[in-house]
Amino acid sequence: MEVPKRFQAGWEGMSQVERSVAATLLGLVFVLFLAVIGGVLTPAYFVFLLGLGGMYALLSLGLNAQWGFTGLINFSVAAFFGIGAYGTALMTADNSPIAGGFSPITGLIVALIVTAVIAVLIGIPTLSLRDDYLAIATLGLAEVVRLIALNQDSWTNGSAGVRGIPPFFDGWPILDGLPRALPGFRIELVPGSPLFLETPFYTAMLNLLIVGTFIGITYFALRRAHRAPWGRLLRTIRADEDLAKALGKNTYWYKMQAFVLGCLVMALAGVFYAHLNRYVAPGTLDPITTFYVWVAVMLGGSGSNRGALLGGFVIVAIREGTRAIDFGALPLEAAPLRLLVIGLLIILVMRFRPQGILPPQRELIWPGVVDDAPSQPDKAVRDTRGANNE
Amino acid sequence: MPPFEFLASPLLGYLANGLVYSSIIVLGGIGLSLVYSIGGFANFAHGDTMTVGAYAAFVTYGVVGAISGGVLGLPVGFFVALLAGIAVAVVVAVLTELVIYKPIDLDSIGLLITSIGVAFVYRAIIRMGFGADFRQYDIPTLRPIEWLIPYGVRITRHDVVIVLSALLLVGGLHVLLQYTDFGRKMRAMADNPDLARVSGIRTGRVKLWTWVIGAGLAGAGGVFLGLYNQLTPRMGFSLLLVVFAAVILGGIGSVYGAMLGGIVIGMVNQFMPALPQLGRLFPIIPRECDLPLVTSQCGIPIGIEYANAVAFLIMVAVLIIRPNGIMGEEN
């Protein structure tokens, strides 16, 4: 039997949209590469940006597990990101008011355990709620978490934040001292603008390695999970929860699993952020982060993991693009412009392409399942079948 | 010696403050509830509609502030600015409905997410125009009303204006809903849009008027919030969750529930300072305690910085116990 075209790997198996996205991305990377060569962007900062994009991609993968696959409207992304960041920061940092001084691996494990506990605590009252109530309740509870981080000075240092967080590879056998041990290079590809490949660059590369590993594990774990019967059940819940109940499934329990899983992925992004930034403050839990991630997921395509990856990098493009305005000639501030761009993107995506740029194809979720079923079929059943088996 | 001195208590003061704060939340909550029941989605841009009203009043007051004369410590120019704030909020909300929400063919969740985008656009534009700094109407701050101070009540004549205006607006809405033909149409549509439509009600028109009323009240609430506190681009969005808590508490979609919920949440917010000292304030509770998890004055050890957190927890608790709110219909 011939493999359907859309399951083939490589350029041949891509849809028109995928090709244009891939081409745009390649073009963008090329432009950035030129900027690096030309000395506009330092190599260390370029790699740092890639790492940041990876962090948003990770957050988007987490939200996608909740919203894209299971249909849970979680507006507490920033809270779980913050819990992950604070979890590891409070375990490892010098001025941590609680523990401090533990290794980052301990920090990671504690952060994930704390996240799981809080996710269950938030999930218990909210996951049985209707969709829109779930949205409001999670946003409210995220605000409670933020207020605690801001006001409980004896736990979190309050608005002063937690400083002195070690890098993630602190205390590891080889990787710890690697950025300082590697020889520095000075490459001059374009005369007059040398590139320095020194300690900051190697540190950024190591960070990229961490986030890359996190993303790799998450991406393949999620893909595996969603192709399993478990994932099929989640998709059924998203499409029609009553149907799943009628089949005798405890949908509340499955929603809880998906919720906790997604929150753990978000906390992983928070752990990465804490060791990247080496400083965590209550601003980390600002609800705007939640909506950045929502934009990333919707732009990429709800339910599509590749879309979530793409969305994460688009967010960094917006953040850094608007930051560039600050240095430019335009009489505009970056912060409101960023807000405007995010707001307009949400409206435009919902208006013109609610399925996102890269809607699910290989995730075995068909648009008909992802979007609410139309009130009347626009095609005969036989046509739909034919299209799927093409 | 003031008469009725035995009444004097910090509780009376909290009650008065609660009344003022509740008025603002009720004004915001009614619009949110109306749009939910007739527009069919939770409008996250509602808080920022309040901000739009506040800033429109700010600009108008800057122009007409010189008009002399005044009531209760407020110049006539302020009331002109109030009307302008209401009008601008209405125009902005109706335009948004026509240009953005109406053409979008999505379910209530899609509209909910869209409204977050709308909220960001409002806030971004305000911030571009006015900066992120705190602003104030150019009205001198008043001292608390003298003869109320002995009772522990410290409210200004501005606060009285806020409460009276809110009462007037809410009373007007009550008359509109209960005693006019239009109100009956609105209630019919909130009950069952399809049935209302086949009964010959022009549902499109009713929906548009719902936006007018909801945004108008939100605009007024925003202007008063600016008078009560200060103006910042974030003011509405920060209040939104509290307003949601009030509306859900009362039963989302119910106008009278929104009023009740607004009063409860506003009161809870202002009674926060009472919580750590319950023993001192209420004669029923022993004055001093030596128990774990309780303050030395038999109260709950929680600071006023958690006022919003308490409101959200109440909201979540209500959602669990009574998912349709206090006044919500069982279905």
Image (spheres, coloured by chain):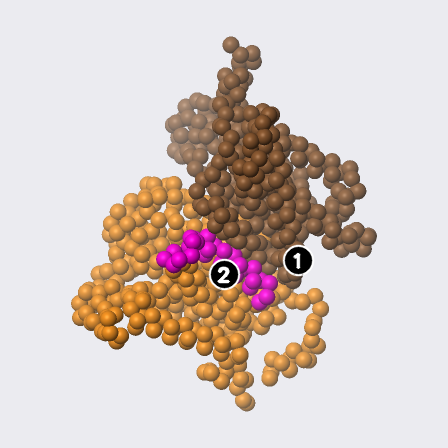
Chain colours: A orange, B brown
In the displayed image of the protein, which residue is found farthest to the right? Answer: B199
For the point 56% across and 50% down, the residue is B44
**In this rendering, position of residue A209 left or right of residue A171:** right
For the point 67% across and 43% down, the residue is B213
**In this rendering, position of residue A262 left or right of residue B219:** left
To which residue does mark 2 refer? A295
Could you say where residue B293 lies in the image, as x and y percent from the top left?
40, 34
Amino acid carrying label 1: it is Lys
To which residue does mark 1 refer? B102
Q: Nearer the viewer, residue A139 or B140?
A: B140
Q: Is residue A178 visible?
A: yes
Query: Label 2 vs label 1: CA separation?
Result: 21 Å
Q: Decide: few, some or many residues near mark 1? Use Cα within 10 Å; few <14, some 14-19, many ≥20.
A: few
Secondary structure of the residue carrying numbered label 2: helix
From the viewer's perspective, is residue B158 above or below residue A176? above
> Which residues lie in the magenta part?
A326-353
Could you say where residue A3 lies in the image, as x and y percent from the top left?
53, 86
For the point 52% across and 76% down, the residue is A17
In the displayed image of the protein, which residue is found farthest to the top? Answer: B1
Q: Main secondary structure of the magenta part?
A: helix
Could you say where residue A31 lies in the image, as x and y percent from the top left?
38, 73
For the point 53% across and 79% down, the residue is A16
